[in-house]
Amino acid sequence: MALSGLDIYKLLPKTNCRKCGYSTCLAFAMALAKKQVVLDKCPSINPEVKGTLEQASLPPIRLVTIGVGDNKVDVGNETVMFRHEEKFHHPTAIGFIIDSNVGDADFENKIKLIDSLNFERVGQVIKVNLIALRQSGDSTDFVDKVRKVSELSSLALVLMSSDIEALKGALEICSKQKPLIYAATEQNISDFVGLAKTYSVPLVICADELEKIEELSQKANQEGLADIVLDTGIKSITKKIEDLTYLRRLSLKKKKRSLGYPIVALVENDDPFQEAIEAGTYISKYASIVLIKTVESWQTLALLTLRQNIYTDPQKPLQVEAKAYSIGQVTEQSPVMVTTNFSLTYYTVLGEVEASKIPSYILCVDTEGMSVLTAWAAEKFTPEKISDSLNKSGIKDKVNHKRIIIPGYVSVMSGDLEEKSGCEIIVGPKEASGLPSFLKKI
Amino acid sequence: MLKELAQEKWSGKINSINIGATKEEGGSRTSVVKIGGQATLPFIFNDGDIPHRPVIAAEVWDIAPNDWSSTLNSELEDVYSDPVSWSKKLIDEFKVDLICLKLQGAHPDLGDRTPTQEVKLVKDIISNVGVPLIVIGCGDDSKDNLILPACTEATKGEKCLFGSAVQDNYKTLVAACQADGHNIIAESPIDINIAKQLNILIHEMGFGLDKIVINPTVGALGYGLEYAYSIMERARLAALTGDKMVAQPFICFSGPEAWRAKEAKASIEEHPEWGKELERGVIWEVLTSATFLQSGADILVMRHPKAISTVKGYITKLMEIK
């Protein structure tokens, strides 16, 4: 838990020596609480207090970075049990497990397919994050495949093996890409921690029981490894939900630093539907990394969409700029449709207008990201607001008519809006899906 | 023990509801559905009791749907014209726990079927299937106030679940369900305060809080799923900490919502990058439904047989405690 300025002040020398650049220790404490300055600026702090303050400033769940450059992925640093309390911060990293014994051609095709799995939804690009190469068979082949995958793809990597020599060979090739190592167990913990430290890469610690996980992570931490990811092994969905929930509770509510790390969940099921449903469950329930086996675009699209939903900030709905958008080769006769600036609303309308192939204007009114009915109920989508947008957007100069199409759900405002805007109001369909046939008729 | 340290014990619990009545109980159902009763968050068995599994209701219409996607049509088209066969197919082949009959055709714009016609249909289904029944109106308030009371009367004693009572139109349906011994669905627009308020209003009419099911109005995967997900989590937390006015089980219309999504309906020609059409439609319904199980759904209303059997398998796995 972060300390307040006053809590910090109590621990400072209270000499007001000004060497930190602040006129008083209290001012320095306040700045520290806001993270505007670092503790090292105080020359006379005692080491014990320093330890306490540093410990208190650590997040309850550590942020771990896998990979480098544009495709690096940050996981962890979560602060709440439920998304409505604040938000979930770092979207679950989604990756695919590939066994190293697949044939070269299959291997390359799979990597190319994984690389192509990105989609655009409501103005955001959603994409997969990781390729997890798992040693199946001899170590030379594994190392060879690691070389191939790091040449073929720029996605962040997970190296899965229990063979430390194979991992060394692999890390000689790709340690600069900061792959995640999977996994240290009770049997090999010291060797694996040593390996992760030597190559400065994050490490997964795997054990079935929470007590064992805690013991191993403490050991790793004492040996100087900070970037740790936890795995509670393969178990039933219900046990896994309990593990994930309990680990989140223990790190946030019980301040268990030794369990305050991102969690990875492996899902392997020959039935792609059962695999997706299980992966989806862990995305909703606190997994920071989910690794699956199936590579199918329909499955990935569904999982990435779920992740986008769950990790949307509940306080800030996705919005588009409130303005008039021209769709296609618009002319002075093109129809003008009015809707809200909620991303989902805009992109749904946009999709249907594009499908209709009728060049049109879409005027998005600033409703603070609310959908049509919600905005109407909250008085953010009113005749006043709409006529104001009609004037400010300059749309009236772009067309030579005065006809405005409004969503069917707000047909009740027609009369009022007609009066306020001086335009002819046409009531459109209730659902965007009715737009193509509607636009063809008018 | 870390597990004990992490455990959370709750003071409240969700109401238990029985849907359907057997011959001994004054109805004619061969099976009864029990939902609710949880004293813990979804599937956290170690914190508290979860006496009943979530159930699946198959959505059946009184008229043949003309705007369902080709993926649904190819599975169900042959039974669209006969709601009894439609119900039987999903009960016999796919083992759904309930039938959710939507009286869509009563809508003035969609056929304007009469109360007599709807009563005959409901009676037909009651006499031909053994599972409990959910009956949903057409959404036109004044028409629903004609057809639904006629249907509650015709099924008196069967302990059906009728919907939907909404904030602006609940009195007629509440009175009808009260008189004929049915349960009721209270529907609110993704708003926990309205959900609570509506329960209070219904309760003030003398209707038991233990006969109400909340419909929180869910959105599909990719179409506002997270709003209802969080509303449900908030309601569950309130209920588990003692608020009896939101301690009702949830019904989620995840199937109908999922099949409105473009991703579920679009052909492979329109969006080749989205992958196979059949699987994509099914996964949209599956993942929408499965996610709401994690926020507390007790009844899922679903459409596609493959999606139904997939989610049913998932529920079985979720209820395995070992």
Image (cartoon, rainbow, N blue to C red):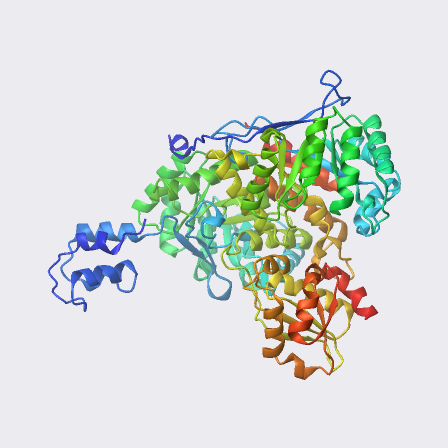
When asked about the image quadrant of residue B11, the answer is: top left
x then y, percent, for residue B110: 84, 50
A232 and B96: which one is in front?
B96
**Residue at (57%, 71%) from the top-left corner?**
A321
**In the rendered image of this protein, does residue A181 appear above or below residue B298?**
below
**Residue at (43%, 30%) from the top-left corner?**
B9
Visible in this render: residue A79? Answer: yes
Query: Which quadrant, please, contains the C terminus of chain A?
Result: bottom right
B28 and A38: which one is in front?
B28
Q: Residue furthest top?
A: B24
**In the rendered image of this protein, does residue B174 appear above or below residue B225?**
above
| Count of residue discs | 0
x then y, percent, for residue B152: 76, 31
**Residue at (76%, 53%) from the top-left corner?**
B277
x then y, percent, for residue B316: 64, 31
A358 and A267: which one is in front?
A358
Relative to B10, A33 lies left or right: left
B301 and A191: which one is in front?
B301
Visible in this render: residue A99? Answer: no
x then y, percent, for residue A340: 62, 65
